[in-house]
Image (cartoon, rainbow, N blue to C red):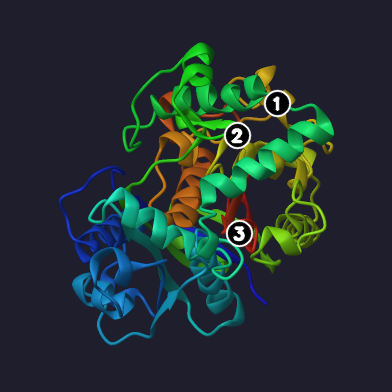
């Protein structure tokens, strides 16, 4: 297997967008190819992350539609679906295509247009990423499921609502520095704690946003990356793991086995340890999800993940910056786009081009993308240089 590098990135603004799902995807693809300095004709394959285009917009078969709108020609096109991890899975397939020699240059994108559906419809569509028979059918939507996770974490480890609120405050502060972020709003700890309840103990500011948006990356073989881009970023590891979609089937709902497995294998592949990572984009669909992810990946011991936000360690300027983009919490969460947007943020940071949210001297970054309530996980590790 040969080395793989990222040589182009593109992200649309996240939020309520007027463009169609195809237009959003094509816009991100165009930005990524422009950043790579390559014409559409150079792309040899296209991988798209999309969770529920058909349910949100009535449009299925999106990979060839977006490829055609992007001018790619008759290249192989594949759509990957893994709930909220759809973008991460598309990224992994792109990496494998280049690493195996099947293609030399590929385009990977993720897209979702969610605001075309009502909030009630969106909740129902998202719930289909869980176990319908045991959860969605009985009314257990994702806020309710992650509320159960939060309550159990609080019971076992003493995690507090203040620690979860601190995650929201941090990510909103980071989002203010990201011009593409959906939520440009500073909040205080008191505002987060006093927000309208959604599913106890989670309030409004504990939950990620319903967003439209797209992101894309161009990948190539590392051996030619330096000839194509002045600041290529190497893919050190690409891993994926799975677990039961239903909380009732998990032995411990304070731990996502898919994250732990994918992260363990990714660190082995990269020959690194968690302490070698300079920044991370992790899947904070809810504030408790960021806390659990930090523990499962190995950045914190079990039960200590809340300390990171409480003590400022995971904020910009802290010892382990997490979600400098604003995360799903403030940047937004157009489901199929999220995993690819995380990669774009890590690449931007490792290039030293993140502006006001730049992590000084960042050389190694990690992207963690979770699907459902821990059923699917993709973890990627990157380093500056080809």
Q: Secondary structure at mark 1?
A: helix
Q: Secondary structure at mark 3?
A: strand
Q: Is residue 50 above or below residue 181?
A: below
Gap between marks 1 and 2 measured at Cα: 9 Å
Residue 373: quarter of image: bottom right
Mark before the other along the chain sequence, 2 or 3: 3
Mark before the other along the chain sequence, 1 or 2: 1
Residue situated furthest front in the rendering: 138
Mark before the other along the chain sequence, 3 or 1: 3
Residue 205 seen from this side: yes
Residue under pointer 1:
308
Q: Is residue 261 above or below residue 188?
A: below
Is label 3 or label 1 in front? 1
Residue 226: x, y in percent? 50, 58
Residue under pointer 2:
322
Left or right: residue 32 versus residue 303 is left
Is label 2 or label 3 in front? 2
Near-viewer residue (60 or 150): 150
The label shown at residue 235 is: 3
Residue 176: quarter of image: top left
Near-viewer residue (243 or 215): 243
Near-viewer residue (191 or 283): 191
Q: Residues within 10 Å of mark 1 (few under 14, many from 20)?
A: many
Q: Residues within 10 Å of mark 2 (few under 14, many from 20)?
A: many
Quarter of the picture holding the N terminus: bottom right
Report the residue at 65% width, 57% height from top: 374
Residue 363 seen from this side: no
Q: Is residue 177 above or below residue 259?
A: above
Report the residue at 58% width, 67% height from top: 131
| Residues at marks 2 and 3 touching, judged by CB atoms closer than 8 Å | no
Gap between marks 3 and 1 measured at Cα: 26 Å
């Amino acid at each position: 297997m040969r080395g793989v590098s990222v040589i182009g990135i593109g992200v649309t603004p996240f939020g309520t967008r007027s463009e169609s799902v195809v237009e959003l995807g094509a816009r991100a693809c165009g930005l990524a190819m422009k950043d790579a300095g390559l014409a559409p004709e150079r792309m040899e394959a296209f991988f798209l992350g999309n969770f529920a285009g058909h349910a949100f917009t009535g449009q299925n078969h999106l990979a060839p539609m977006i490829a055609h709108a992007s001018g790619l020609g008759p290249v192989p096109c594949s759509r990957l679906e893994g709930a909220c991890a759809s973008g991460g899975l598309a990224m992994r397939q792109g990496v494998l295509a280049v690493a195996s020699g099947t293609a030399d240059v590929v385009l990977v994108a993720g897209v979702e247009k969610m605001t075309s559906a009502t909030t009630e419809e969106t909740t129902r569509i998202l719930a289909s990423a869980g176990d319908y028979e045991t959860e969605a059918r009985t009314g257990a939507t994702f806020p309710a499921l992650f509320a159960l996770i939060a309550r159990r974490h609080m019971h076992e480890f003493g995690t507090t609502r203040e620690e979860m609120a601190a995650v929201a405050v941090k990510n909103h502060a980071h989002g203010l520095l990201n011009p593409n972020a959906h939520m440009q709003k500073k909040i205080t700890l008191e505002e987060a704690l006093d927000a309208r309840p959604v599913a106890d103990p989670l309030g409004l500011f504990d939950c990620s946003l319903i967003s439209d948006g797209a992101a894309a990356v161009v990948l190539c073989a590392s051996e030619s990356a330096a000839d194509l881009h002045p600041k290529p970023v190497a893919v050190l590891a690409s891993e994926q793991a799975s677990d039961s979609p239903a909380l009732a089937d998990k032995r411990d709902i304070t731990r996502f086995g898919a994250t732990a497995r994918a992260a363990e294998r990714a660190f082995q592949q990269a020959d690194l340890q968690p302490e070698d990572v300079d920044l991370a984009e992790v899947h904070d669909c809810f504030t408790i999800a960021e806390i659990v992810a930090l523990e499962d990946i190995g950045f914190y011991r079990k039960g200590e993940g809340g300390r990171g936000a409480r003590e400022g360690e995971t904020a910009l300027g802290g010892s382990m910056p997490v979600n400098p983009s604003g995360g799903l919490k403030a940047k937004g969460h157009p489901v199929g786009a999220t995993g690819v947007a995380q990669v774009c943020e890590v690449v931007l940071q490792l290039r030293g081009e993140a502006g006001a949210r730049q992590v000084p001297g960042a050389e190694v970054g990690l992207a963690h993308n979770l699907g459902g309530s821990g059923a699917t996980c993709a973890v990627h590790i990157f380093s500056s240089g080809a």
